[in-house]
Image (tube, coloured by chain):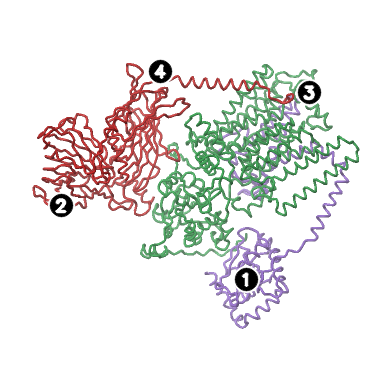
Amino acid sequence: MRSIALLTSCLIALSSLCAAELNLTQSLSSKQILPANFKPPQVFKNVNLVRTTNLDKEYPREVINVIIENIDSKPQSEYYLPFESSLLSRVGGLEVKDKKAAGKLPFKVEVVEYDSYSSTQFYLIHLPEPLQPKAQQTLSISFSVLSALTPVPATINQMDNQYVQYTFSAYSPSAYTTEKQKTKVKFPTANIPDYSVLDAPNADNTEDPQKQGSTFTYGPYANIPAGAEELVSARYEFTKPLTHATLLERDIEVSHWGGNLATEERFWLTNRAATLANQFSRVSWQMTQYSNPPTSALKGLAMPLRIGSLNPYFIDDIGNVSTSRFRSNAREANLELKPRYPIFGGWKYSFRVGWDADLKNYLRKLKTGDTYVLKVPFLEGPRQPEGVEYARVELKIVLPEGATNIHHETSVPLVASEATIHRTFMDTIGRSTLHLTAINLVDEWRDRDIVVTYDYPWTAGFRKPIVIFSALMGLFTVVYVIGSFDVSIGKKKTA
Amino acid sequence: MRWLLLLTASLLPFTAIAAKKAPKDRYQDFRTKSLSSTPLKLDDASYTKLTQAPRDYAVVVLLTALETRFGCVLCREFQPEWELLAKSWTNGDKKGESRVFFGTLDFAEGRNTFQSLQLQTAPVILMFNPTTGANAKVDAQPSRFDFTAGPQSAESIHAWVSRHLPEGPKPAVSRPINYFKIVSVTTAILGLITLVTVTAPYIVPLLQNRNLWAAFSLIAVLLFTSGHMFNHIRKVPYVSGDGKGGISYFAGGFSNQFGMETQIIAAIYGVLSFATISLALKVPRISDPKAQSLAVFLWSGVIFGMYSFLMSVFRMKNGGYPFFLPPF
Amino acid sequence: MATSPVDPLLKQLTGPNTRSLLRVIILLTIAAAAVSSRLFSVIRFESIIHEFDPWFNFRATKYLVQNGFYSFWDWFDDRTWHPLGRVTGGTLYPGLMVTSGIIYHVLRFLTFPVDIRNICVLLAPGFSGLTAFATYLLTNEMVTSPSAGLLAAAFMGITPGYISRSVAGSYDNEAIAIFLLVFTFFLWIKAVKLGSVFWGALTALFYGYMVSAWGGYVFITNLLPLHAFVLICMGRYSPRLYVSYTSWYALGTLASMQIPFVGFLPIRSSEHMSALGVFGLLQIVGFVEFVRNQLPSRQFQTLLRALVLVIFAVSFGGLVLLTVSGVIAPWTGRFYSLWDTGYAKIHIPIIASVSEHQPTAWPAFFFDLSMMIWLFPAGVYMCFRKLTDEQVFIVIYAVLASYFAGVMVRLMLTLTPIVCVASAIAFSQILDTYMSIDSPTPEVQANGTPASASVAAASAMLPDGLRSTRNPIVGIYSYTSKLTVVAASTVYLMLFVMHCTWVTSNAYSSPSVVLASRLPDGSQHIIDDYREAYYWLRQNTPENAKIMSWWDYGYQIGGMADRPTLVDNNTWNNTHIATVGKAMSSREEVSYPIMRQHEVDYVLVVFGGLLGYSGDDINKFLWMVRIAEGIWPDEVKERNFFTARGEYRVDDEATPTMKNSLMYKMSYYNYNALFPAGQAQDRVRNTRLPAEGPQLTTIEEAFTSENWIIRIYKVKDLDNFGRDHGSAVAFDKGNKKKRAHKRKGARTLRVE
């Protein structure tokens, strides 16, 4: 059920990727509903496919390099990529580029929906120019899968190492026949207690998989039919926290008067790592603090902010958290957060951080007219060696009161974007605000920017002082008038 | 547990005698004794005899140290209550249905018992339930009442006893009505009324005298603000000697004080406010310039000195108080 | 403060407008000083709610703001006193919450994105400014000198006696109650002076507000009747008194009965009977006066007077009768323990256990009032000069309040305003006398100091004025004497200010939730264990996990951890508290069923042994035992927690009962694992702990904060194999049994 909801949202998202401004109707029209008995037309074949799965972070990063060939008689431009539906709701940031021209913008990608009860769903990749018959093209498809690692065993002791299991298909999922393919799996460690070995020998009759150090290779396989699947799984040591943010709310407030850009981020973190077999023992925790061995508990978060960020704060529901450090100088502005308690597997921690920054580093006024261009990072937040994954990110950009004609543009796939009014600090008409929502992001997307352009006439800046002044004047006059009435009964006493 | 062992051990010599007497008539002669005088005055021998198992009656024994050389205030305070309880109980059931004895064992007579019980505090009430008979308790262990909560009234002990007793008659404590007190109080009241009526013409102007009321209320204020109620409630000592044989007038520590101390403080306050009053009211009424300026300097000096002394005393009470006035 | 002596100086030179402007400016500065001197804790730590009760008020306020007034009014809180719950809406004084709720909504209407927490934190300082102003008004009603009011306002603004309960973050009823107290008194004085129904009604209005804000309203309820009564006895009966009192009593009683918590108390309980009695008395006296004016026969008047006395006596007897027969509730324990000071210690251990209900030693007075403590009697004395009605009020208030403050530390609060007023009167008297520019020349004897007229009036009014004010005022001749006095008083004022600042910053500005310690390099290190543990509970336990702890922490758990508690600081159910006390002080086998019955999931104890934090549960343990013993005298015995020598120990000497008590076990469980074997140190008790630490069977350690101040234990579920936990654990440990060994004390007779 949930996957379906996410599915639809993905749909809107990917379509609105190219929609430069807030006109959702146009993008919604591009959504296509397919008949229930849909099969991707067998117009392509994968000549050669190499899939690389990188497991050194807490979320697997897949890169599929495939040479496709048009085996149809007429030019084709729609390449389908199948996903198992539960997996599709966890796939984040799928990007397709032309391997030959990596500098180009990514292709247009969208989720196509037909029978929502089917177990397979498709991404539809639009090639920018239709591929001629017999012609070939190399696609490089990259995406990452969230909450894909499951700790096995699920409960460990406080000091134990943690092992996680990743299950995937040895055959890369494809809607077309694949002549030749193999799957490379890069593990972060050589400590891999068990992994599935395929008895069916592969094309060049070696044992499957082949190991070089911490890299496994499944395949090569020849002539795999469309939609074929061979589930394999590997269990390897990963004694690091699986930091998972169920929700990140991020507010950015622009103030022209103060020349200030205020940012606040609210996190709902949880640690997907193995839970504690026994309860938390402070004694053994304090013992390990001197030599800190790898642990599956989340001890702290490092947030590299943009240089020039000022007076940060780190609070949670019950007030200030005193265990944070902020190192700021010309080269860096590092905010090091330490939660109130170490976050073990299954534990939660929700908090908020905020900081200010000088607006002129982010805002630029166009030569012509009163148009301003705001360029801020779509996502900041912590950068961890093992990575952080965000199930949902809600960005709110509050523009100054009276800003009009607002457009935004970003390379981050959005699922929703709307404009509302936000009233605060004695606003009269309120401040126009952008609400942008993205799902399944990972901390690699920190450096993606969002660009907002809006018009802001200089007169708008003087609305508030005038309003307040006139209100006070009115108040005084009223008081004066009332005070001048004599409502006393009989002759006045002298107090 | 272990002092029961010791108890039985200490019983050994007596078992011989005790074996001869059946519990029945043991009960009888204690009964007669108690009817003549209760609570029974016990010594080591009679104590062991009384509390020895098997017994088909209950025994409540107060182990106390009445003699003044032990200086047990609590014991002496409690003694009348105890006797009241015992008497009213014994009178309560003449037929002795409850089969309870009340005994008092003074440390003077019962030294051995005290030691065998390893008692280091007095008073203590021990209650032995019957071991045989209809309402026998399984554990021969006597239940014990310590006076940790301070002095007890006869009623509270009565409640405790009857809580431990099996069902049966539990005659309530009957305090004898103190006729003398009533009479004296009434006469006093009547006398007071007559006195008032007679002396009214002299009293009334006195009552209307402003200085009197002023003095009264000032004294009250000074008393209360100098912590008199604290002395009253906490019953602090008047003074206490310091280690070196001298007297220390000021108790150490922020939140305790001596009686003497509060009086000194009250005096200081009094002097200070009197000086203030004279500066404010008396001095401007002095018509002779010389006398006036003299008075001004006098009173200002008094205030200054007193205040500085007060602060020095306060520094003594509250270490780390940074402020002071010369000279102290 | 230093500005206020300037005021009378300018008086001679400037016109009334300049003066009133100056007065406004001075009052504003005073208010600013009052507010800013209460912000130490915010600056040092953060904007946080302080110790215990404020957390409940804060929680209630949030509930009010979220769910609206009516659902707050009938709020049944099932997250406290589990499983009983508490009818919170009907058992609290809503004034505080409603006030901050209104402020919150006004600000929201002006679209200020202000957090309710900050309103709650800053409410007390804000109101302290108002209190200073109210004191100014009250004092101005008392004396003619204009500087007295300003001085009183300044005193009130910065005196520690009031700051102690109104620093930023101490969000308690007293925060607004003191302002209401003073302002109600001002209105009352005004009403008595003018005899106008309007002011009487205003008094009633603010009295009602006061009733809704603080239980201390009883003080007003008894002080105003006393004032009226004394006035009558002094033969000062007047229609003004009649009008003001009756209008206050009628309206005020009605207003007070609107509060659910008060309800019908005003006509049912003894605390309010004096007001009723005086009301009746006033009717009679009024009637008599009326008749006397009609027919002047002397016999008839004597008859009437007799009649009055008889009726008064009869009605008083009736009152006593009703009280005895129980129609009128006798005094509540807290109130009763004010008069019979030994009462609480014996009968209500819970009340006796609270530190702020202890009597006051004299250093506390000086600590809170400094110089004013000796100016105070002088001021009271000066009120006797011309004993006007309002000055009678000062005298009564002074005597009563100082008695109460002597009995209970907490009531220092009610004493402070009158101390400020009285000492301001005295001080301003001196300043006015010695700061007048013009000196008398010996032949010109009469110079216009306001006192002289009054003295004349007084001596005319009754033959014996005060002995100190017989002969007329001349004034001060020499400038040197003026200078001396003025200089001295300036020094005293400066000293007073420094004292107040010092006391405030050192004694009254730490939010006991966050502890601060100094690192060797002098920098401040914050010990935040409470919030660490509370937040862990809030995030990582199920929404309805029941937390058992001693009642001190109930409100904090409710506010910060947002979890249901068994008992909290609103100690309305002694038995329930005793149950918790029993569970804490009994053996595990005994307490486990209790905890199961009450569906306890987690147990929270406070342990200071590692840090030397003395306010921990082992030190409060004896109170738990006592309270439990009060209900189960046979199962919990305080005696068993003392060694044979009667000492309270936690080391090897500790009694078996102590060592087996749940509290002891939870405090020291696993503690000696921190130290080399046999070296375990308790830094509060300064003792070495037994080499072998306690074992737990029915509960397991769930969380321990960084400095071990808070320890949370999870109550185990029933054993899967149906074994009892003891044998289960023993089995897991390979049948390692622990044995408690007895020690034998030396044999010496100690008598108490």
Residue C612: % across, % down: 48, 47
Q: Which chain did the image draw in red? A: A
Badge 4 and badge 3 both on one subunit: no
Q: Name the residue that disc number 2 marks.
A: A198
Q: Chain of mark 1?
A: B
Q: Name the residue that disc number 4 marks.
A: A458
Residue A275: % across, % down: 33, 51
Q: Name the residue that disc number 3 marks.
A: B288
Q: Nearer the viewer, residue A23 or A410?
A: A23
Q: Nearer the viewer, residue A61 or A5?
A: A5
Badge 2 and badge 1 both on one subunit: no
Q: Residue at x 68, y 16 (%)?
A: C13
Q: Which callout, 3 or 1, points at the residue further toward the start of the chain?
A: 1
* SS state under label 4: helix
Residue C585: % across, % down: 51, 58
Q: Name the residue that disc number 1 marks.
A: B167
Q: Which chain did the image draw in green? A: C
* SS state under label 3: loop
Crowding around mark 1 (Cα neighbors within 10 Å: few <14, some 14 to 19, many 20+) is few
- C293 left or right of C491? right
Q: Quadrant of residue B292?
A: top right
Mark in the foreground, 2 or 3: 2
Q: Which callout, 2 or 4, points at the residue further toward the start of the chain?
A: 2
* SS state under label 1: loop
- What is the three-letter code of the residue carrying label 1? Glu
Mark 4–mark 3 CB contact (< 8 Å): no
Image: C364 above or below A332: below
Image: B46 above or below A416: below
Mark in the foreground, 4 or 3: 4
